[in-house]
Amino acid sequence: MVKQKLNATPSIRRLPSYLHIIREAQKTGDRFISGTVIAQELNLEPIQVRKDLAITGIVGKPKKGYPIGDLVLAIEHFLGWDLSRDAVLVGAGNLGSALIGHQEFKVHGLHVVAAFDTDSAKVGRVVHGVPILPIESISKELSKTKARSAILTVPSTYAQSVADAIIAAGITVIWNFTNVRLKVADGIIVQNEDLSSGYALLCVMAQNREKHAQGAATAI
Amino acid sequence: MVKQKLNATPSIRRLPSYLHIIREAQKTGDRFISGTVIAQELNLEPIQVRKDLAITGIVGKPKKGYPIGDLVLAIEHFLGWDLSRDAVLVGAGNLGSALIGHQEFKVHGLHVVAAFDTDSAKVGRVVHGVPILPIESISKELSKTKARSAILTVPSTYAQSVADAIIAAGITVIWNFTNVRLKVADGIIVQNEDLSSGYALLCVMAQNREKHAQGAATAI
């Protein structure tokens, strides 16, 4: 189960990039796109792109590639982005506000219905059309909506206690932007969004570049 | 080269989580940590953890595990987090401000020396101790610092033109938070931070959960 998850994770992570490229091609009026073209855009191996796209159930046509309309639908359906997902946001600071306003999520069906905060200075405000409500009201508010997903952008020190409270209020899916490994009951989904992961990749690539540059300089 | 990158990427992505857990264990006074303990915390296979840690060059001791002090140093050195990395931020909106204030990056050696924006209402302000300067001054400001890395958090429509301008000003490493695939010259490092990737994983996990829940309900 865990192994399965590990194998599929990088493929799922890449699907949004594919979707972005495919939609751009669609805008120019193309009806087919080849895995090779997608691979070139993203600096990947074509076999990797074909394997990744296979998880959505679509198969390309020899010499023509993938029918763009079907491919968009297949990826969106696989990701559940053809449906709307109502969510709440907890912790309406800078990061929370940025996520509420992130246009791309709206295209992917993410609909933030309410934001919650403990800060009385923030409560009552409206951020990108979303009202900021007191955290104590989350249970009452959830009963009014079908939102069972929460974006967690509180300070790390409050992450576990807030997670406990929102799960008690009915949240079953948490997109966790804190660096705390939340302890949750079985059946609660937590997706950790660790910005340090991307920073780690950046640093390794930058170091490799610097080493190569030094090597080149020495060679001269 | 691309293949190498693909293989190592998920391992590098996981290193910050390992570092976090190892540091927590260090705080409690532990001197050794086993790969199995790390694996349990992160719901991974122990063999995966050992393979990932091997890229930093460290080897565990049978029955004892990894010496924590050495392990922290090895991961930090591999990631270059034992050194300070000066960077600038371009686009001081909500996301940019959140990233400047992100405490964890500071622990990893990231030092944002200046932020740039086109908005005259923002220019002159100080965000989390970092001054917001006019984008036109980037070339002059870069000449005063050793920052050659930039965090790009501008609206997508400006991403390519701003990238061109900051590369011309001397930036060689870009952490790209826009959804634009930047066209850059060879030798320029771009790390795309695609928040939609994490959202894709969240959606797939949530859907699987919902299917299981339905299955269970049907079984009852």
Image (cartoon, coloured by chain):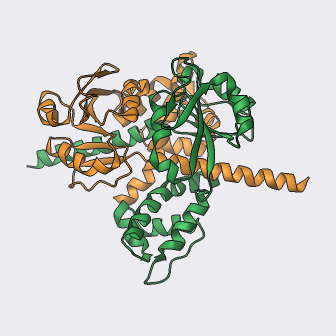
Chain colours: A orange, B green
| Quadrant of the drawing holding the N terminus of chain A | bottom left
Quadrant of the rendered image containing residue B156: top right
Residue B75 appears at what percent x and percent y? 55, 63
Residue A58 or residue B137, whichever sits in front? B137
Compared to B24, does B122 lie above or below?
Answer: above
Q: Give the answer, above or below, for where B50 lies relative to A70.
A: below
Q: Is residue A7 visible?
A: yes
Tell whether A165 sits left or right of A93: left
At x 46% / y 40%, what residue is drawn? B101
Counting labels gives: 0
Residue sticking out furthest to the left: B220
Residue occupying image coordinates x 42% and y 33%: A75
Quadrant in the picture for residue A76: top left
Which residue is rendered at x = 43% and y = 49% of the image? A9
Rendering coords of residue B15 (x, y %)? 50, 59
Q: Is residue A83 at least partly visible in the picture?
A: no
Tell whether B159 sits left or right of A213: left
Q: Position of residue A21 (x, y in %)?
A: 55, 28
Task: Find residue B128 and report its horizontal and vertical position in percent.
Answer: 48, 37
- Tell me the residue at 43%/66% (across/down): B22
- Farthest residue, direction bottom: B63
Q: Which is more toward the observer, B40 or A66?
A: B40
Task: Pick out the residue farthest to the right.
Answer: A220
